[in-house]
Image (tube, grey):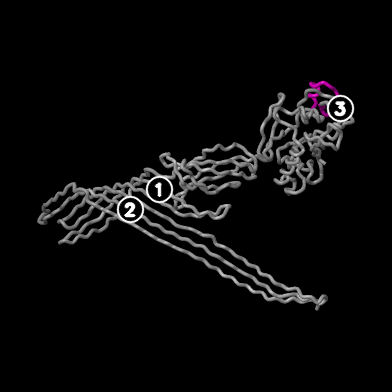
Amino acid sequence: MRYFTFYLEGNAGFNTKLALDLTKAFEKEDIKKLRTVGKITAKFAVGPVPVWITFKADIYGNFKVAADATAHADFGFESKHTVKVGGTYTKATDSFAPIKSFTPINKVYPLNLEGQVNASARLEIYPRAEVKFYGFFGPFMEVVPYVEGKYNARVQSLVTAGGTENFLAWNSGIDLGLDFRVGSVLTFLGFKKEFGPEVLAGNVWPLWSMPADIVLTSTLPAETTPGKVIPLKFKVTTSEGAIVNLCPIYIKGSGTFSKQIVFTNTNGEASLDWTVGSTQGDNLFTATIYNADKSIIKELTKTVKVAGGTSGTGQLVYDGRTYKTVIINGKEWMAENLAYLPAVSPPTTGSTTAPHYYVYEYTGTDVAAAKQNTNYTTYGVLYNWPAAQAACPSGWHLPTDAEWTALENYLIASGFNYDGTTTGNKIAKSLAATTNWSASSSTGTIGNNLSLNNKSGFSALPGGYRYYYGYFSTIGSYGHWWSSTETSLQAPGTATCATTSAL
């Protein structure tokens, strides 16, 4: 035996929770006869039977106040502890290494508050018509128009990115209604007993309520970039258009929010910041105001388009020609090779300081003739670096080396590699057009199954290259694009460039 280990392990824990509940209710009703409109007694005989009927109409007033409140609070604490004590003896060194560990696990259940308050006041002024047979028994009917005001409030909890938030949600309103009540009364020798009344509910017409409506008062952009912070401002009003303060607004949607619950100020307004997500296409948020019972009063949904590699194409008109453009990661790129041709040079003429323009396989100097070349109409113009810097339309520029790198990194991270992975640079197929590339049997290359190309919309074409010693090469197999970043690793007047190959 070279070594042995022994130890004692113990576990202990406890869980405690404290809860408190309170309930309180109040109700008061005051019914008064305001006026007797009239009383008529009719006595007649039906054959040998005398009949005595009394008709009576009164005006009553009733004011009823009711309120109830409940509250619940709880919090708790859970603790678990593991203790291990022992040691390891190693014979070769005649040494003893103690084992002693203590692992506490403590969990706090945060304070949870729940509760509600409901209050109402109802005013009724109504006529009551009674019919009594022989003065002691008969039915009655009440036609009851009323005005009722209500207030409801409830403590609610919402789990947000910052944790659990407790807040007070509330709503109030005034309604006009009409009810009917029917019953009967028995009066005999000083004894009076009323049966009913049964309430037949009629119509209710809301006169006023708050909160009632929510609108977005800030302006949303039609299109934005991933991760853009957009300020949002809301306004909450009553049914009559008056402002409502201290009203909670619940926010959820794509991306993240500086707050998920905001309260209106004394102007009825509430503000927060929305950081849109990275999902290309429509990103939305929803702002909602609720009744105290969590039913929806009004819900507002808005969308913003987040630009990405497949967000569609635009147009650019330059030098009499219309070019397609595409937005990738918030930047607009030309989706066609530039065909700006103010002059044309044969491939044997070149410079690192003066601009030169070339059309693949054209060896003359006539611009009009060069534009008749099919390579010009398909692939555009080949530029040396000075020409490329001068050829950009107004408001456009050659991408820097950093901008090319950012494009590559974005496409890689967004799953534009041909195999769908997010590591390694395999984005050539997603950049390349679906036509004019040489065929290839190698998996993942541009020329292998052209129909899978151009997921980014960049539409790169293989325009080839003019070698500095005076001839054209690699059309159909390679495309080269300048950057504006000059490099010290090559001759003066040269720059880094992006290259895409079918092979």
Tag 2, which secondary structure?
strand
| Nearer the camera: disc 2 or disc 3 | 2
Marks 2 and 1, how far apart at CA: 15 Å
Closer to the chain start, of discs 2 and 1, is 2
Q: Which residue is mark 2?
A: 65
Residue 380 x %, y %: 77, 29
Left or right of 52: which side holds 92? right
Evaluate whether residue 94 shows in this view: yes
Tag 1, which secondary structure?
strand
Residue 19 x %, y %: 48, 64
Identify which residue, 298 or 262, lies in the foreground.
262
Identify which residue, 73 or 430, lies in the foreground.
73
Residue at image location 22% in from the left, 51% down from the top: 33
Disc 2 to disc 1: CB gap under 8 Å: no
Closer to the chain start, of discs 2 and 3, is 2
Mark 2: few, some, or many residues within 10 Å (few <14, many ≥20)?
A: some
Q: Which residue is mark 3?
A: 350
Q: Which residue is mark 1?
A: 172
The quarter holding residue 321 reads top right
Identify which residue, 153 or 476, lies in the foreground.
153
Disc number for residue 145? none
Q: Tell me the magenta residue range.
A: 356-374
Residue 195 x %, y %: 25, 58
Q: Quadrant of the N terminus?
A: bottom right
Query: The residue under label 2 is which amino acid type?
Result: Val
Residue at image location 86% in from the left, 27% down from the top: 350
Left or right of 67: which side holds 435? right
